[in-house]
Structures are given as C-alpha cells and as structure tokens.
Amino acid sequence: MPTVSVRLSEDANEELETVTELLESDKSTTIRKALGEGLATLRERHAVERYQSGDASVGEAARLAGLSVGEWLELAHERGLTTQLDETDLSFDAERAGEL
C-alpha cells in the first residue's frame, strides 16, 4: 500500500483527533475513511456540475461520479437535478439503462 504524507493545520489535526476518538479508531484508518468519502463526494459534485451545465450526459455524469446509470438517476432525482438533454440523448440513455 503506498504511503502519502500531508501537512495538516492545527485545526485540521484537532478535528482528525476528535473524529478518530468518535470512531474509536486510529488516525490512519480515519484518514483512509475520510479520504474515500471525500473523494466520492468530490466526484459526485464534479459530475453534478458537468451535468447541470450540459457538458455531460446521464451516462457520462454517472461515469464521472463513479456510479451506475441507475445510481446516478437516483442521485439526480434526490438532488432535484434537471435534465440538460435533448430527446435523442434521452433515448440513447434509456436504451443503455435497459441493457443494465
């Protein structure tokens, strides 16, 4: 497993220690969990931005978010996202979803 070093501000280190205690874990495990959840959140946020701007189709947004098309559609529904796609794009995405 690769090793990564980071410098933390005093506030971030204190927050890390607090969360580590809350999770009854060690710092390395807490950092791995936080990084995993944080990266997933960043991917989803990027996908939402691209989708909302019309730069990404449903399939592309799902790929960017690291989700299946079905999971993306659930996320989009939960967040009240509006489609930026035309009828051709929707038909294509519906066909792809049917293949899953």
Image (cartoon, rainbow, N blue to C red):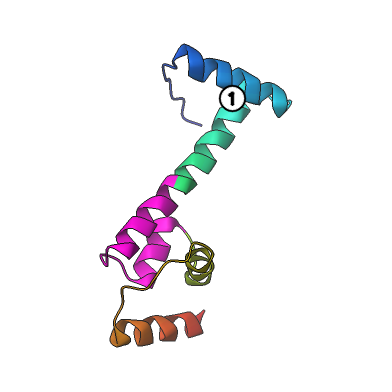
- Could you tell me the amino acid type at mark 1? Ser
Find residue 5 and report its image quarter.
Answer: top left
Total residue callouts:
1
Left or right, 75 with reference to 83:
right
Residue 27 rendering spot, x and y as whole percentages: 61, 22
Residue nearer the viewer, 26 or 17: 17
Magenta-tinted stretch? 42-66
Residue 93 rendering spot, x and y as whole percentages: 39, 80
10 Å crowding of disc 1: few (<14), some (14-19), many (20+) = few
Identify the residue at image location x=37%, y=87%.
91
User: Magenta region's main secondary structure?
Assistant: helix
- Asked if residue 36 is positioned above or below residue 25 in the image, the reply reads below
- Asked if residue 40 is positioned above or below residue 73 in the image, the reply reads above
Decide whether residue 93 is among the magenta residues: no
Find residue 47 and report its image quarter.
Answer: bottom left
Identify the residue at image location x=49%, y=85%.
98
Viewer can see residue 26: no
Residue that sits furthest to the top in the current view: 10
SS of the residue under disc 1? helix
Residue 1 rendering spot, x and y as whole percentages: 51, 32
Residue 37 rendering spot, x and y as whole percentages: 53, 42
Viewer can see residue 6: yes
Left or right, 56 with reference to 75:
left
- Check disc 1 and report the residue beneath it: 28
- Asked if residue 51 is positioned above or below residue 38 in the image, the reply reads below
Left or right, 1 with reference to 49:
right
